[in-house]
C-alpha cells in the first residue's frame, strides 16, 4: 500500500515522519555516500520538504518499506536548483510535470541480487496512479542509467535531459519519463497485480482537498 | 562530436526503430564515430558462469562472421574477459580494462588475441540489468576505439536506450520456439508451485539457497513470466510441470 501525504500531513504523524527522514539518511547518505547532505541527527531533510511536496510511503506490515518524494516543477526543484549540471538547457517545468526524488527501498525489502523488488515496483505503480489521477503525465527523475532500460521495459517514454555525471558512488542521469494508462497496465502486468496500490482514503483525498 | 542535441537525435532514432536490425543500425551509426563498428547484444542468463550454462539469447548483432564461428566453435564465451567482467560488475568498461583484469589467464589472453585478427582490437561493454534481474550485455568493438570520459558517458546512455528498445521489440515478438526448462528448474518450480520458499527448496533438493533462487529466476526468464506465480501458471499451461 502506498500512502500519499503532503508535508503537513506527514508532520502530523511524528512516527512516520521520523521513519521517512531516517530511511532517507540511511540510504542516501550512509549507503550512497551523498556526504553533503549528512546530518548529525541522521534525519535527512532539505529545503524541498516544503508544503507543496508530496511524500509517497510504501507501507508493509505497518512499517515504512519504501519511499519517494514528488516535487512540483512550478516552483524550484532539485534539477533547477541543485543538480543543474545534469540538465542541458532550461529544465522542464509545468503543472503536468513533477520531479520524483529520494526513491528508496528499505534494505529488508530488496529481493534478489539485481532485479526490482516488489516494494520498488509498487512505488512505480504508485506514482503512475497518483499522476494519472491528477493530470500529471510526466516525471523528471535523476537515476542510474541502468534505470533507462527498466523504464523502457515498463513502456515509459523516456528522454534524457542531459549527460550522466558521477554523484557519490553513482552515475546519475536526469530523465523525463512520460506515461499514460497503458504504462500503468504494463506496470501492473509486470507486478502481477491489477489492484490500485494507492491508499484510497486519507492520503489521497486529503491531498485532493489541499490542491 | 557528442553534442547533447546529437545524442538526443540518435536516441530518438533508436526509439522509433521498428525492428532489432534498425536498433542495431542506428546504434552503430552513432558508435562508429567513436571507432566502434561492430556490436553484439544479448541476454546473458545468470547461470552463465556455470558448467550447465544455458545459451545466451542474442538480441542483435553485427559481428564478423568468421569471429562468430570461431567464438562458438572454441567455446570462447567461458574465457571471454568481457563476459567475465560483466558478471562481476555492472559498470560500463572497455575491453582493455577487462583484459588487464583477467591478464593472469592464458585462455582469456587467447580470446582477445584472436579477436584482433578480425579487427576487433578494443571495445566498450555495457552490462545492464533488467527489471527481472537478467543481464543484458551490449559489447561494441572496432579497430580504433577512442572516447573521452564525456563521450563514454553519452555512449553508455545511447547504448542503454538501444538495449531498452531492443527488449521492447523482442518482448513483443512471438517466441520462435516454446520455452524449455532444465530438470532442476522444473523441479524447483514444482516445489515453488506448492508454496515452498527458496530456503525450503534448497533443503529439499540439497542445493544452496542461492542456486535455488537462480533456478527459479532462470525458469521465470525462460517462460517470459513477470513473476513466480505467472511462471508456475505458464509452466503448467505448457505441460512443463504437472
Image (tube, rainbow, N blue to C red):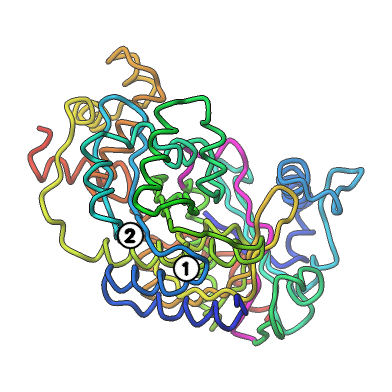
Distance of mark 1 from mark 2, alpha carbons? Answer: 35 Å
Residue B31 vertical position relative to residue B65 in the rendered view, above or below: below
Q: Position of residue A97 (x, y in %)?
A: 61, 81
Residue B32 location in percent, x, y? 45, 69
Q: Element at badge 2?
A: helix
Marks 1/2 same chain: no
Left or right relative to A138: residue A192: left
In the rendered image, the vertical position of residue A181 relative to residue B147, given as above or below: below
Give the image quarter of residue A95: bottom right
Residue at image position (59%, 43%) is: A62
Q: Quadrant of residue A188?
A: bottom left
Is B26 on the left-hand or right-hand side of B69?
A: right
Q: Read off the residue under disc 2.
A: A189
The residue lying furthest to the front in this view is B117
Viewer-closest of A205 and B115: B115
Q: Chain of mark 1?
A: B
- Which residues lie in the magenta part? A95-115
Residue B60 position within the rendered picture, expressed as x and y whole percent measured from the top left = 29, 60
Residue A57, compared with residue B78, is above or below; it is: below
Q: Quadrant of residue A185?
A: bottom left
Q: For label 2, count other residues whose C-alpha is less than 10 Å away and answer few (under 14), some (14-19) or many (20+).
A: some
| Residue A34: mark | none
The correct choice, above or below, for B102 with respect to B113 in the image is above
* In contact (CB < 8 Å): disc 1 and disc 2: no
Residue assigned mark 1 = B31
Amino acid at each position: 500500500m502506498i500512502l500519499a501525504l503532503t508535508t503537513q500531513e506527514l508532520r502530523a504523524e511524528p512516527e512516520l515522519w521520523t521513519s521517512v527522514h531516517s530511511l532517507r539518511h540511511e540510504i542516501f547518505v550512509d549507503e550512497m555516500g551523498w556526504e553533503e547532505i549528512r546530518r548529525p541527527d541522521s534525519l535527512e531533510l532539505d529545503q524541498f520538504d516544503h508544503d507543496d511536496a508530496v511524500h509517497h510511503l510504501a507501507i508493509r506490515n505497518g512499517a515504512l518499506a519504501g519511499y519517494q518524494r514528488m516535487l512540483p516543477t512550478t516552483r524550484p526543484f532539485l534539477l533547477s536548483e541543485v543538480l543543474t549540471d545534469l540538465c542541458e538547457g532550461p529544465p522542464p517545468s509545468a503543472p503536468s510535470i513533477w520531479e520524483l526524488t529520494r526513491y528508496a527501498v528499505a534494505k529488508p525489502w530488496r529481493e534478489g541480487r539485481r532485479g526490482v523488488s516488489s516494494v520498488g515496483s509498487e512505488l512505480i505503480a504508485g506514482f503512475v496512479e497518483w499522476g494519472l489521477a491528477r493530470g500529471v503525465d510526466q516525471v523528471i527523475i535523476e537515476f542510474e542509467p541502468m534505470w533507462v532500460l527498466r523504464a523502457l521495459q515498463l513502456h515509459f517514454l523516456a528522454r534524457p535531459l542531459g549527460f550522466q555525471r558521477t554523484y557519490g558512488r553513482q552515475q546519475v542521469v536526469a530523465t523525463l519519463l512520460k506515461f499514460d494508462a497503458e504504462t500503468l497496465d504494463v506496470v501492473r502486468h509486470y507486478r502481477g497485480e491489477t489492484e490500485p496500490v494507492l491508499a484510497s482514503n486519507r492520503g489521497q483525498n486529503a491531498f485532493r482537498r489541499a490542491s | 562530436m557528442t553534442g547533447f542535441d546529437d545524442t538526443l537525435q540518435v536516441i530518438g532514432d533508436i526509439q522509433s526503430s521498428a525492428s532489432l536490425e534498425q536498433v542495431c543500425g542506428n546504434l552503430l551509426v552513432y558508435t562508429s564515430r567513436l571507432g566502434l563498428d561492430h556490436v553484439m547484444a544479448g541476454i546473458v542468463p545468470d547461470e552463465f558462469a556455470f558448467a550447465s550454462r544455458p545459451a545466451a539469447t542474442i538480441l542483435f548483432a553485427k559481428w564478423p562472421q568468421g569471429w562468430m564461428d570461431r567464438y562458438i566453435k572454441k567455446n570462447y564465451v567461458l574465457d571471454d574477459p568481457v563476459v567475465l567482467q560483466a558478471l562481476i560488475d555492472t559498470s560500463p568498461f572497455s575491453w582493455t580494462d577487462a583484459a588487464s583484469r583477467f591478464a593472469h589467464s592464458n585462455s582469456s589472453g587467447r580470446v582477445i588475441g584472436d579477436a584482433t585478427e578480425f579487427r576487433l582490437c578494443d571495445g566498450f561493454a555495457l552490462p545492464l540489468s533488467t527489471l527481472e534481474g537478467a543481464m543484458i550485455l551490449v559489447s561494441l568493438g572496432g579497430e580504433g576505439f577512442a572516447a573521452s570520459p564525456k563521450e563514454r558517458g553519452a555512449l553508455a546512455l545511447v547504448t542503454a536506450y538501444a538495449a531498452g528498445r531492443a527488449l521492447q521489440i523482442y518482448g513483443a515478438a512471438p517466441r520462435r520456439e516454446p520455452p524449455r526448462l532444465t530438470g532442476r528448474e522444473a523441479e524447483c518450480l514444482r516445489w515453488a508451485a506448492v508454496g515452498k520458499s527458496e530456503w525450503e527448496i534448497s533443503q529439499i533438493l540439497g542445493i544452496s539457497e542461492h542456486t535455488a533462487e537462480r533456478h527459479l529466476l532462470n525458469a521465470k526468464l525462460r517462460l517470459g513470466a513477470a513473476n513466480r506465480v505467472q511462471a508456475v501458471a505458464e509452466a503448467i499451461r505448457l505441460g512443463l510441470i504437472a
